[in-house]
Image: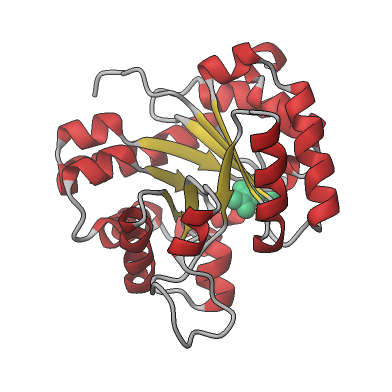
Amino acid sequence: MAATARTPLISGNWKMNHNHFEAIQTVQKLAYLLHADDYEVVDVSVHPPFTDIRSVQTVLEADETPIRIGAQHCYFEEKGAFTGEVSPAMLAKLNVELVIVGHSERREIFGETDELVNQKVKAVFKHAMTPILCCGETLAEREAGGAEEKVSGQVRAGLAGLSAEQVASMVIAYEPIWAIGTGKTATADDAQAMCKVVRDTVAEVAGEEAATSVRIQYGGSVKGSNAAELMAQPDIDGALVGGASLVAEDFAAIVQYRSHG
Ligand code: PEP
């Protein structure tokens, strides 16, 4: 498939880290470290815990910092008796632009199924936000030769019922579970091969145009030292970063991978 101009998206998933004071400090520092020319070539998002989003929004908007506000997940219903959940409408009201859906921790710890993930993807679109649909195999699945089947199955299920235009506009994060938070990164070749599987699956499900436009992130122990090699791969259009996104300097080094490679 021909390479196209897909602006890379580097997203920081803070998981259950940083209270709202720490969140403010982190985004202020990040805003100081990133410059106008970074935002010209890379889209950047941060995904704080729900309790931080309003604080982060206030700081970013007051300073007109072009870091996009993201969330780590949401429920699919608009409102109602769903104790503890947050709706996409509530996130949209806080100018959240991107919502991670189906992260492996949500799937493994909280039992999110492919069907639930698909409902959430649709709900995020309904509120004019962009889903970052996560997929990825376990080590056992990889060693048994089932990585491609697992990932293409998750992608098919996650995209069910979407229009080709919706698929074209979204983000898919390939995150091998064995590389998340372990310090083990997939080799650039392995990451590229799996991101190609994702793109080929999108082509089958939603057509070539959607596959050419959809942005595919790699996630799994991305750092300043390995970002440039990963980002050089033709089917990798960004990174979903966990641990290294918690420290502004480390995350900035990933965003500025062109000069830190
Ligand atoms: C993640 O949780 O999405 C992730 C990739 O984490 P880490 O960068 O810490 O491996």
Asked whether the viewer can see residue 1, the reply is yes
Identified at 32% across, 68% down, the residue is: 119
Residue at point 61%, 17% (across, down)? 38
Q: Quadrant of the N terminus?
A: top left
49, above or below 212, in the image = below
Q: At x 70% / y 29%, what residue is drawn?
A: 63
Q: From the viewer's perspective, tell me whether residue 97 is left or right of residue 168.
A: right
Q: Nearer the viewer, residue 13 or 37?
A: 37
When asked about the image quadrant of residue 153, the answer is: bottom left
Q: Residue at x 55, y 36 (%)?
A: 239
Residue 192 x/y as whole percent: 44, 32
Specify whether 75 is left or right of 219. Answer: left
214 on left or right of 49 = left
Q: Position of residue 179 (x, y in %)?
A: 62, 50
Asked whether residue 186 is in view, the answer is: no
Q: From the image, which quarter does the C terminus lie in?
A: top right
User: Could you tell me residue 154's position as x and y percent?
Assistant: 34, 60
Mark count: 0
